[in-house]
Image: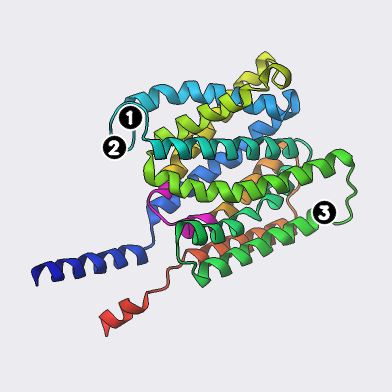
Amino acid sequence: MLLTFALHERRRYGRAMKRAAPLLPILSAMTGLLCFGVMDGFMKIAALAVGAYAALFWRNLVGSLIMLPVWLARGNKDGKRGLPGREAMRLHLLRSGVSGVMATLFFYGLARTPVAEAMALSFIAPLLALYLAAVWLGEELSRRAVAGSVLALSGVGLIAAGKFGGTSYNAESVHGLIAILISAVLYAWNLVLQRRQSQLAGPEEISFFQTFFIFCLLGIGAWWFAPVPPAQIWAVLAASAVLSTASLMLLGWAYARAEAQVLVPLEYTAFIWAAIVGWVVFSEPLTWRTLAGVVLIVAGCLIALQRKPAPEAAAERA
């Protein structure tokens, strides 16, 4: 009888924790996305100077050198030193491969389109990720998460309509748009892998191995596609590497503590940072359509983050 009571209390506590809004993971994820948004601006500068492949290769070299001593000092998720377990290492390799191709395509497209437009096109990813998380991770897909994501996506569509309307694109721009769309599909897969990976590995481990494995992957073609950057670009790459590794750790910490369907809709807030970076650094104007779209994006995120009480909770209160 005592064991039955203990199990009942454990299930009740688990349901209560699930209903609670995970404030710290949400703040951590939003800060990580802010870092990524600013990092995109630095990477566009580097990609315009030396090409997307070279910029990503050298950035991950710098990031690996930054994160190696951090990972060695902190150890793996269980605090032990040495290489991670087989399952964690398999996920590090898989996500690094997906992220490497995804990032190369995205920065190729980013060098050929405005920052805000590139981000708008990439926002098919969070919607795809919600369904992938339901299928692969077994997460229950709430109507609020879907409704909030659709509302946020409509905000992106409103902004994109204003950006693309009446604009003629050359061949390079079309190639950039296609690259970003393919990158967005891979990004959806990456978001789901991130949730699974964060359950097996700590943020320092995730950041180091993903950065290092992408560097190794791109090293295959570095002789041909990654010329040594000019001296003034190294500072840009270093800033990008710091922001990237910080973002990976913040997002890894957040995804270990909250479901993908809670955090994935926050991806839409990245558009806000992209619009600001594009306006400040690249003189891309902010129009009323952009501001209206931002309102829809924020509203969609707030709806998606609301947690509906479970039926059994209502029964307990009755």
Residue highlighted by disc 3 = 164
Residue highlighted by disc 2 = 78
What's under tag 1, amino acid-wise?
A: Gly
Query: Is 54 part of what is drawn in magenta?
Result: no
Query: Is 259 part of what is drawn in magenta?
Result: yes
- State the residue at coordinates (12%, 67%): 3
- State the residue at coordinates (56%, 46%): 190
Horizontal side, residue 46 vs residue 188: left or right: right
The 10 Å Cα crowd at callout 1, few under 14, some 14 to 19, many 20 or more, is some
- Between circles 2 and 3, the one closer to the viewer is 2
Alpha carbon of mark 1 to alpha carbon of mark 2: how far?
Answer: 8 Å
Horizontal side, residue 72 vs residue 269: left or right: left
Residue 220: where, in percent of width, then height? 64, 22
Point out the tag, 3 or 1, that comes first from the N-terminus.
Answer: 1
| Of residues 116 and 147, the one drawn nearer to the viewer in this rendering | 147
Alpha carbon of mark 3 to alpha carbon of mark 1: how far?
Answer: 47 Å
The residue lying furthest to the left in this view is 2
- Prevailing secondary structure class for the magenta stretch in the rendered image: helix
